[in-house]
Amino acid sequence: MPPGVVAGPGRPAPRLADGAAPPRASAVRRGHRRRRRRRHPLRDLDHAGHSRARGGLPAERRRTADHRAVPATTGGVPGADRDRAPGRFPRRLARRPADGGQQRVRGRHAGWRAGERHRRGGQVEFSGADAGPQRVVNLFYYCCLLHDLFYLLGFREADGNFQADTLSRGGVASDSVVATVFPGTVAATANMTTPKDGARPRLNVGIVEATGRHTALDATVVFHEYTHGVTSRLVGGPINTLSLTAAQSAGMSEGWSDFFACSITEEPVIGAWVVDNPDGIRRHRYDADYPGSFGDLGTPEFATKHQIGELWCATLMEFARGTGTPLALQVVVDSLKLAPANPSFLDARDAMLRALEGMRASGKLTAVAHAAARTALWTAFARFGMGPGASSDGARLDGLVEDFSTPGIPVVTPTRHSATARPRRAIPDKDPVGISSEVSFDVDGVVGTVEVAVDVAHEFRGDLEVTVTSPAGTNVVLRTADPDPGTDLVMVYDAASAPGLLGLTGQPIRGRWRLRVADRFRLSLGVFRSWTLTVTLR
């Protein structure tokens, strides 16, 4: 399937959140070296550098698309460090329209023609003698999408990512990806070579002869190849080009590429569209029934790097099913930076555990979330024989010892602190100041959730206004005066009934907390009997 700008069999094509068309390619006129550039329409994408996609055709007919840098602006990136990420990233990188569709892309050169489009079933396909421009645009789009996604996950300038300009954020510049669309076949139908940081990686895609379909139109293939560049730069550092050459390491390189391709496209197979086979190009689908285990490495079933990579990808997919894909992607990217050069499966497993510990220590995961993710990780690895007792002679394929057990993982329950005050005081009638009561916590910790239980005897509770104030001085209005004719106010406020309490998350618990109750109208009287504050720490 081509799950991207061009729709094909399988899932509908993803499009940018605002429905914008993909970038128009600039034309290289025959006999002219100067390119005419125009700013592409994807204005909500902000690439620090550019990806370049070109057709592998004779020079006079070569199609070239250049994506120039867009100046960074202020703004945040969900899930990323605000002070490190360029602004104007899209909040949602891509979405899949319900009915599929296609993008109209036309070159400015008179010789360019868009491929003919037709529907077969619920899918849009492209054909025609001059489909090269569409392939170029598709590959260009995929490279831009992957650059931004991996940037959000932490593959940035100092890590050796692929940018023409590193914007003074570290790393070496002038190494944006050269992505080439060939009209015929290429080695392995698609491939990517990644030299050290500062030298340009090259991604090549071509035709699959058996089907006549082009790998530029299959996102799983392009995402697989692009991820090879990411893992090459992150494992062992951006200048080590030999960090994934050991037997297990080379297999994991293939497995990581399959994992990201499947996770991003939400497909359990690789290359299904381009080979016109729903089971794709691997021996088994990456689902919960994937066979094999760690001890099978080196046997005829798991001898080549792609076969070894299948087992690694199956393990990561099992982990993602247990913890959720977004967290799994982040853990894997973080672990690539922590893994040694030429790691074994067990080395990479341990790097993932350290990545989880780092997320817990930095506050990105609560104690409860960390425990759940750690349990999911050990469950996945034990499922494939890589429990705590497994061992390996380096990254070789012999001397492997399996272990299908999981370690004893203590259940982490949230730490809750409660305090109650019973003022039993009359509330002044029609007084916006009202009366206040305080409780104190003499413990250290960071607020996760807050609940406030209020007990007020009153003749007309619609007169009442209730506000809680944290030690940091943040006021949260729990209730405003309204026409409610009921008597007494006995209520427990939480984030669902009082969303303002979410603003207290992350503040220190230590200190004095205050609750103020005011009666805003005349005639009806009441007594502030008691209140209880319950804080759950992160």
Image: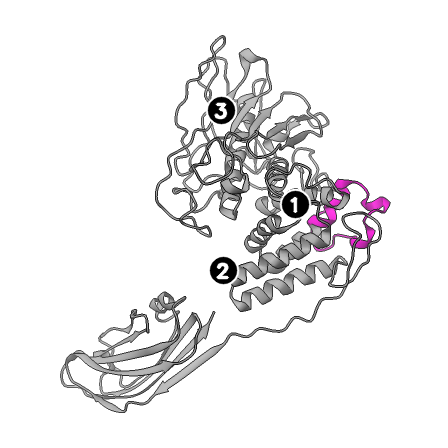
Q: Is residue 461 left or right of residue 250?
A: left
Residue 458 lies, with reference to residue 46, above or below; the image says: below
Alpha-carbon span between mark 2 and mark 3: 38 Å
- Image coords of residue 16 (percent x, y): 45, 39
Which residue was labeled with disc 3? Answer: 65
Query: Type of residue at label 1?
Result: Trp
Q: Which residues are the magenta region?
A: 285-313
Front one among 357 and 262? 357
Tag 1, which secondary structure? Answer: helix
Label 2, residues with CA under 10 Å away: few <14, some 14-19, many ≥20: some
Q: Residue 239 falls in which quadrant of the image?
A: top right
Mark 3 surroundings within 10 Å by alpha-carbon count, few (fewer than 14), some (14 through 19), many (20 or more):
many
Query: Left or right of 216: which side holds 43?
Result: left
Residue 397: tell me if it is visible. Answer: yes
Q: Where is residue 533 in the image (x, y as percent from the top left)?
A: 38, 80
Q: Which mark is residue 364?
A: 2
**Mark 1 / mark 3, whichever is N-terminal:** 3
What is the three-letter code of the residue carrying label 3? Ala
Image coordinates for residue 390, horizontal then vertical, percent = 77, 60
Q: Is residue 474 magenta?
A: no
Q: Earlier in the sequence, mark 2 or mark 1?
A: 1
